[in-house]
Amino acid sequence: MNKIRKTIGIDMDGVLADIEQQFMDWYENEYGVRVPRAERLGVLEPEGFPEKGAIRRYVNTPGFFRTIPVMEGAIEAVKKLMEDYDVYIVSAAMEFPQCLSEKQEWLAEHFPSISWRNIIFCGDKRVVVTDYLIDDHCKNLDFCKGKAIMFDASHNVNQHHHLRVNSWTEILAFLEQEKSSEENTVNAAIA
């Protein structure tokens, strides 16, 4: 009998891809000023830097999404998750259509084991139904039909209505705990 695998939806920017680091690097490169995370806490990305149009310009610049650094621990964690779960990459990429090919190339480089069938580029994540959704924006997590997991980011520090994780290590620990709890429930039901 085949066991039905649970599904996990994983956001790209701010979860797999360290977009905060990219914003800070690009801003410092252009303006010579490093705007630290502490100064951007609780502020959406476009308002977190002194030059208000910079972030919008960056996300519309060819190469921006293609060169974002990988979030620490993400590659190893996704490989581990794929052993027990059906993993889907879910990115609301339609706002910046030029990023579609860049995101696809970025995933192929950093996460080559993820099939194109498991990549979902969309406009609104409410249409995606997975057992778990890992994202850094409440606008996506608020509609999650499974368990919402909020990846910590400077812009979401004041949001407290979803389970918060600070790293990929914490995600793996949480999901391992979930799996153990489910196995204990099944074993208790059988006994």
Image: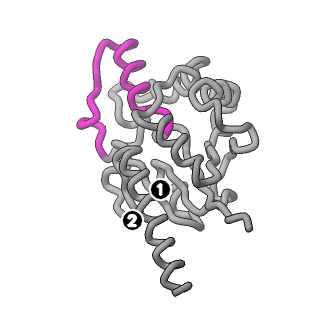
Q: Residue at x 26, y 29 (%)?
A: 36
Measured in 3D between alpha carbons, the distance from the residue under mark 1 to the one under mark 2, in whole angstroms, is 9 Å
Extent of the magenta region? 16-41
Callout 1: helix, strand or loop?
helix
Callout 2: helix, strand or loop?
loop
Quarter of the image with the N terminus is bottom right
Is residue 107 shown above or below 163?
A: above
- Relative side of 68 to 118, left or right: left
- Relative side of 16 to 109, left or right: left
Furthest residue toward left: 38
Is residue 26 in the magenta section?
yes
CB atoms of marks 1 and 2 within 8 Å: yes
Q: Position of residue 65 (x, y in %)?
A: 56, 26
Furthest residue toward front: 191
Q: Residue at x 65, y 34 (%)?
A: 113
Task: Name the image colouring.
Answer: one colour
Is residue 158 shown above or below 122?
A: below
Tell me the residue that label 1 is attached to: 138
Q: Position of residue 50 (x, y in %)?
A: 33, 27
Q: Residue at x 41, y 29 (%)?
A: 52
Of the pair 29 and 90, the residue shown nearer to us: 90
Q: Residue at x 40, y 13 (%)?
A: 30
- Indicate which disc, 1 or 2, sits on the residue closer to the N terminus: 1
Tell me the residue that label 2 is attached to: 161
Q: Residues within 10 Å of mark 1 (few under 14, many from 20)?
A: some
| SS majority, magenta | helix
Is residue 159 in the magenta section?
no
Label 1 sits on what residue type? Cys
Of the pair 92 and 169, the residue shown nearer to us: 169
Q: Residues within 10 Å of mark 2 (few under 14, many from 20)?
A: few
Label 2 sits on what residue type? His
Is residue 132 shown above or below 71?
A: below
